[in-house]
Image: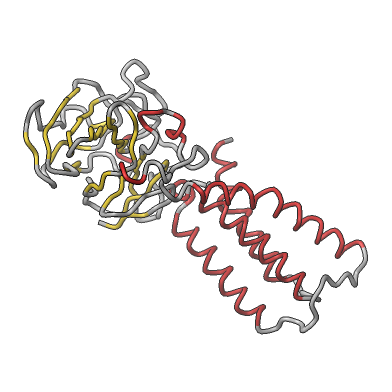
Amino acid sequence: MMFFIIIFTQMILPVLFVIWFHVSEFKGRANFILQFLCTATFIGYTWVVGAQSWSSILIGFVIVLAFVLSVSTKIRRLPKKWGFRIESGWKDITFVITQSLILILFLPIVLFGLMGYSIDGSSDKSAIDLNFPLDQGVYIVGHGGSNPLINYHNVHDIQTYALDISKLNFLGIRALGIYPSELDKYAIFGDNLYSPCDGKILKVDKGYEDLEPPKRGEGHPAGNHVVVQCEDAEITLAHMKENSIVVDTLDTVEVGDLLGKVGNSGNTTEPHLHIHAAKDGKGIPVTFNNRFLVRNSIVWK
């Protein structure tokens, strides 16, 4: 069921929207603008709210490119008349109503998601800038941002700005299969994890096994993890691979020092890196090389 929903909303529906836009004959410029907004909003929904790493970011880019090319073609043939042209009676009226309903439904969702692309003004000054802790490919953010629509961690005080980071394989997806149980099918599994700052190791917790999805270690949420003191903040890097941690409590580390490897230990649904920063028990924003990452942000390393 999950596979069908993901494929339908992230691939089939966006393609159908683009085809619908491309084959439409616009009798007035207002008709064109409404359908453009309708199609752009739904494609925007798949990028702002949807998880591109599940349906292939390559396909996502192709859909966007196809839409841009279709728009450029249509613009050159636009009628000079403004206003809505209802020349086919109820058929045209039905199109306008359908497009309007889609816009009314999805545009507020997209706009609310986009609000999570910036750091809350009251938290901006407390943000800490880190070095990206992975360095072996193309990475994508699954959960990230400043509101719960694009980052479910946002409802937890200490993890308000936490991120879940996956890696993309050659197909542009995070794993070979929609939700495989074999850990080595996840692109990020086993990647080296490096210190994001100069600092001191405050805590090391290890000894937990890597679980096969969908098993979860609910009794130890972070699994194998390391806490690094960076300036006056505590940075937690969680769900590390069993027997991979190479640092100990009170060790001093520099940016780029190896900490261990990405695994699937703790209360996690699949291999990924969970990282969050906290100060005085409260979550603070994290930027990487002055970039605030949100859902579907891509990092090339």
User: Compared with residue 162, is residue 69 higher up or lower down, i.e. above or below?
Assistant: below
Quarter holding the N terminus?
A: top right
In the image, residue 89 lies at what x, y percent? 93, 66
Quarter holding the C terminus?
A: bottom left
User: Compared with residue 29, is residue 215 higher up or lower down, i.e. above or below?
Assistant: above
Name the residue at the top extreme.
219
Residue drawn 71% across the image and 51% down it = 104
In the image, residue 53 lies at what x, y percent? 43, 48
Residue drawn 28% across the image and 50% down it = 288
User: Compared with residue 283, is residue 52 higher up or lower down, i.e. above or below?
Assistant: below
In the image, residue 198 lies at what x, y percent? 12, 43
Residue drawn 20% across the image and 37% down it = 261
As rendered, which of 204 and 261 lies closer to the eye? 204
**Quadrant of res 253:** top left
> How many marks are shown on the rendered structure?
0
Looking at the picture, the colour scheme in use is: secondary structure
Is residue 162 left or right of 244 when viewed as pictured? right
As rendered, which of 119 and 89 lies closer to the eye? 119
**Quadrant of res 181:** top left
In the image, residue 32 lies at what x, y percent? 72, 71
As rendered, which of 104 and 6 lies closer to the eye? 104
Is residue 157 left or right of 114 when viewed as pictured? left
